[in-house]
Amino acid sequence: MKPAFDEMNTAAGSLRPQYEVYAEWLKRQPAEAMRSRRAEAEMIFRRVGITFAVYGAKDEDGAGTERLIPFDLIPRVIPGAEWKRMEEGLRQRVTALNRFIDDVYHGQEILKAGVVPAEQVLHNAQFRKEMMGVAVPGGVYSHISGIDIVRADTGQGGEYYVLEDNLRVPSGVSYMLENRKMMMRLFPELFSMHRVEPVAHYPDLLLETLRAVSPSGVNEPTVVVLTPGMYNSAYFEHAFLAQQMGVELVEGQDLFVKDGFVYMRTTQGPKRVDVIYRRVDDDFLDPKAFRADSTLGCAGLLDVYRAGNITLANAIGTGIADDKSIYPYVPKMVEFYLGEKPILNNVPTWLCREKDDLAYVLAHLHELVVKEVHGAGGYGMLVGPAASKAEIAEFRAVLEANPANYIAQPTLALSTCPTFVDAGIAPRHIDLRPYVLSSGKTVQTVPGGLTRVALKEGSLVVNSSQGGGTKDTWVLED
Amino acid sequence: MLSRTADHLFWMARYMERAENTARMLDVNYQTSLLPQSADTALQGWSGLLSISELTWAYQQQHRQIDARNVMDFMVRDEGNLSSIWNCLRAARENARAVRGALTTEVWETQNQTWLEFNRMLKAGEFERDPGAFFEWVKFRSHLSRGVTVGTMLMDEALHFLRIGTFLERADNTARLLDVKFQALAGDDYFGPTDGGAPPPGAPATPQEVDFYHWSAILRSVSGFEIYRKVYRNVIRPEKVAELLILRPDMPRSLAACMNEVVANLQLVANQQSSETLRKAGRLQSDLRYGRIDEILATGLHAYLTQFLDRVGDLGVGISRDFLVPMAA
């Protein structure tokens, strides 16, 4: 495998233009100063309580389960023109995905046209038949979308690819916001040297989006954020977003259904709720409709939803569009619904459910990445080039037993970005998750997104649960 | 606001206040133990402290005898003791974390920082090195917590429930402290019908009464020593100490002052079903406002305080029922 595309340095050893000023500044910083800034950042994150919970793990004191996500001091910089193109691509893609979900739960034109195989949709565990024929405000299902993008050198010099779409409850946006705050606090001088596009208005856009999709006839909608509770790994983010938007953070136990509406229990009696930004998975939303053992949801919610008296963001059933077995068809959706050529590329993907694809994958396991169709968080996957013979053999058996559960992709040499590690500054692999907000009238983003970095040398797994960290992401104004 | 949010706020404030009062009692006992005194007196101080908090039984499950080191450890850092400062600060922080969106950033960070720093100090051996400074630190973190609350929060329901929690807990704690400290001096009941009503004014009621250190310790534990001098400009006499801590509305830790705050904040959050709770709170407040110390002493201080604690407990139940416990759908 040839060396990965580096965001700061070209293969010839020169600086990319967007990093010239920064690199010059970085050279002047003593390692000791950087180290103390890093310690300061850690101290502040801990004091502010920007932590995430790891299931079944202990923190460094062996006491609780709250951990910090490592924050890297060196920003990932994206030139303005590159971002503009990417943003267009994101809007196009998310618009097509929303059209697809709407179609799947109504006319199913795309299935009739044979563009996406009907059985892949209708027999998919993510297909929610309860949603058939249900009208949602503005026809929007995925109000908040997190599109994972990687850059790899496949011959044309560092192309962006969509690795996966996250249309259920994408998380991480609070880190995007906190990372920027932290950078401005630690290195204010850098922001006077660069024209960095701001991101702090994200909660405003989010609130605007949520208000715009309230049930019809509601003028001053009551918006709430629904969290599984303080022991959820993303609890900080739920609380943060509720606070930033100035809306209530509720748990399932705070909600109840009466006479066709959803209410929350307040100190002044029941209060009607119109829009729920829910950070609880479909399965747990309504014990009467889905998992009966769920205590995280609200009994009867689905009926209210189907009657159009409450808006859920994201809608129930969006998983049908971000399923890894559906992913290969997204470029075709763009053409089918919008009549446009896709701006963002997919990573070439083999579907192990197809006989020919499976044969190819089995013959090339050592060079492919094989993922579970419904997996998340970097679990249940094989990274061929990094795996031992025994691991490959073990995975082969698992794959052959249930091929439909897997897809495979070439091992992309994810781009690297210089990162401040214990040994000094070294390249580490990164990805990018921009957040896209859809209200039916608008499709908006804030410039950049969350850059995740695999801190282990050579590692391609950026998930926070697997030792990943984050960086501030700068989009420079041209 | 959400009932659950109000509940967390109420308990966050209560636990912080309880941590402070525990630190106050420990500090006074510790300071007293540095004075020359008989082993009996010292023991009485520590066992009294356990009985104030109704923890004698729990303590005896773990330790054979009562001594300063063990009692302090039990009350400061014992994770199995739900009333230890460690557990109070943990609970305050957990409650804050559950509703951090309803708090200002400063309030949340103060709670979080207190918890992190408390554990760091324990680990660094700072409690063993200087218990006095350690208790002082807990007290000041509580001052800070209250100050940052009043100084940064919107004056809405969230603040009112925090204040109700603070003062209800303080009323409870002051009453317990008084009860135990007065009993410690006189066995069954210091002032009570058993010895024929109130002591004659000015006359020492028991030999211990001359023990300036005992009374000044009680006063110091509620930051009342200087206040006493200022208010009475006289030698320290038990009935005046009782009056100061029960009836003076201008003494910030007195029962009267606490009830004034509880009632004022309860009125601000009143809802359709809270009238009975408000009535009870107002009645308790009036009893204190129009009460006289000689009457209270004539019926017996212990009986009076026991009844007061029952009424405060009952108020807590009413507040939970009317505002905090989720209403049926």
Image: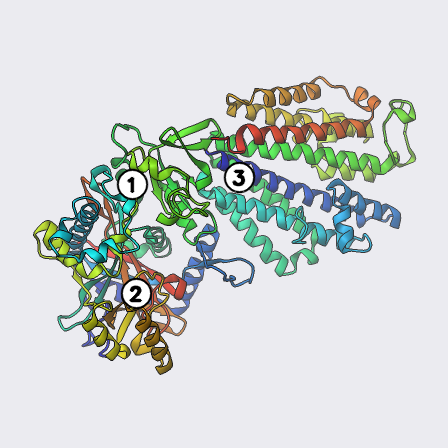
**Which numbered mark, 1 or 2, is in the foreground of this view?**
2
- Applied colour scheme: rainbow
**Which numbered tag is attached to residue B8?**
3
The chain that hosts pointer 3 is B
* A245 horizontally vs A42: left or right: left
What's the residue at 66%, 29% (across, down)?
Answer: B314
The residue nearer to you, when weighing B193 against A10, is B193
The reply to whether discs 1 and 3 touch (Cβ–Cβ < 8 Å) is no
Q: Is residue A262 above or below residue A14?
A: above
Q: Which residue position is annotated with label 1?
A: A204
Q: Amino acid at mark 3?
A: His
What's the residue at 51%, 61% (across, down)?
Answer: A59
Percent position (x, y) of residue B208?
89, 36
Quadrant housing residue A250? top left
- Furthest toward the top, the residue is B290
Q: Amino acid at mark 1?
A: Asp
Report whether mark 1 lies on the same chain as mark 3. no
Percent position (x, y) of residue A376?
34, 61
- Tag 2 secondary structure: helix
What's the residue at 23%, 52% (across, down)?
Answer: A447
The chain that hosts pointer 2 is A
* A350 horizontally vs B101: left or right: left
**Which numbered tag is attached to residue A215?**
none
Q: Is residue B103 visible?
A: no
What's the residue at 35%, 30% (across, down)?
Answer: A260
Q: Is residue B206 above or below residue A202?
A: above
Q: Amino acid at mark 2?
A: Asn
Quadrant housing residue A278? top left
Quadrant housing residue A13? bottom left
**Which numbered mark, 1 or 3, is in the foreground of this view?**
3
